[in-house]
Image (cartoon, rainbow, N blue to C red):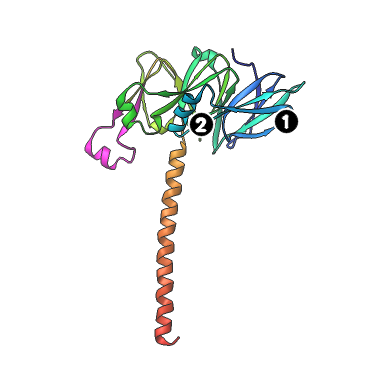
């Protein structure tokens, strides 16, 4: 059974969640997400269930270790975790999802001690080959609070039985375990070549809740890389132009 924890979320676009722990309570988090912790909090780093679980996370690009922040003091104490880029922190009570939820591997922030954090490979080969960011998912199991991060604005969708929604894979944050998840070819030669949305979309089929994000980190990274390449090209041209001017001045005796 997971620890019953209290929390407070600070900020608007660059949020931080502060967890209040009673003596003996703890919270589990990915390595590198902690912002501060008060006296009495101790860090306990482990593989979170054996070497095999650690290796599974490492293979999928996650940290080999999971860190538990445990209150070993005599009174209440606090530990805080920050979102890695602009967006919102989503608190989720797993009891409202039947004790299980799936989330993007980069979305998980922290969870109450007692919640199991597993790597979940998708069940269809098409999803695995073409899913992009959605290929590797994390499965959170338990009966307590978990916190995820969404880039930009959070959009919640409650799908009824048989209702479908097609979304960009990177825009998925989390969804109920009973929501069916598959990859679908976008269709059409011009759409595939010039649509700018990739070749595949994720098809979600209800019933169940879905959390979406308006600005996945992959889009931020793509824009930054594009801007960096453009700047680098401009600098090369600038250097070439400067070199040509200097050479011309030498030849002309200027």
Q: Residue furthest front?
A: 51
Separation (CA) of disc 2 from disc 1: 25 Å
* Disc 1 element: loop
Give the number of the mark in front: 2 or 1. Answer: 2
**Quarter where residue 184 is shown:** top left
- Which numbered marker is on residue 38? 1
Q: Residue 142, how many percent across, how many down?
A: 54, 15
The residue labelled by disc 2 is: 64
> Which quadrant would the C terminus be assigned to in this image?
bottom left
Identity of the residue drawn at 43% across and 46% down: 223
Q: Answer whether residue 198 is visible to the viewer in this image.
A: yes
Q: Is residue 60 above or below residue 161?
A: below
Q: Answer whether residue 210 is visible to the viewer in this image.
A: no
* Disc 2 element: loop
User: Does residue 157 appear left or right of residue 4 in this picture?
Assistant: left
User: Does residue 171 appear left or right of residue 47 in this picture?
Assistant: left
Q: Is residue 165 above or below residue 11?
A: above
Q: Which residues are magenta?
A: 184-204
**Quarter where residue 165 is shown:** top left
Q: Residue 116, how many percent across, how many down?
A: 53, 19
Residue 201 highlighted magenta (yes or no) = yes
Total tally of numbered discs in the picture: 2
Residue 22 highlighted magenta (yes or no) = no
User: Does residue 240 appear left or right of residue 95 in this picture?
Assistant: left
Dot 2 crowding, Cα within 10 Å, few <14, some 14–19, many 20+: many
Q: Residue 33, how many percent across, how many down?
A: 59, 34
- Which numbered marker is on residue 90? none
């Amino acid at each position: 059974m997971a620890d019953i924890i209290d929390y407070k979320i600070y900020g608007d676009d660059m949020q931080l969640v502060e967890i209040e722990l009673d003596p003996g309570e703890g919270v589990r988090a990915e390595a590198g997400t902690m912002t501060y912790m008060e006296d009495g909090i101790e860090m306990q780093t482990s593989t979170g269930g054996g070497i095999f679980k650690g290796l599974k996370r490492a293979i999928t690009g996650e940290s080999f270790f999971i860190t538990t922040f445990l209150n070993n003091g005599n009174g209440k104490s606090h530990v805080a975790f920050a979102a890695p880029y602009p967006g919102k922190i989503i608190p989720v009570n797993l009891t409202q999802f039947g004790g299980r939820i799936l989330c993007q591997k980069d979305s998980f922030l922290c969870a109450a001690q007692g919640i199991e954090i597993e790597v979940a490979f998708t069940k269809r080969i098409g999803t695995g080959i073409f899913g992009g960011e959605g290929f590797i998912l994390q499965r959170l199991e338990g009966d307590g609070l978990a916190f995820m991060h969404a880039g930009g604005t959070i959009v919640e969708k409650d799908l009824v039985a048989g209702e479908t929604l097609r979304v960009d894979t990177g825009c998925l944050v989390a969804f109920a375990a009973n929501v069916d998840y598959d990859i679908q070819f976008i269709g059409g030669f011009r759409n595939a070549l010039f649509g700018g949305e990739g070749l595949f979309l994720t098809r979600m089929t209800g019933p169940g809740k879905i959390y979406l994000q308006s600005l996945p980190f992959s889009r931020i990274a793509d824009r930054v890389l594009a801007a960096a390449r453009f700047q680098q090209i401009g600098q090369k041209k600038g250097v070439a132009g400067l070199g040509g001017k200097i050479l011309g001045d030498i030849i002309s005796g200027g």
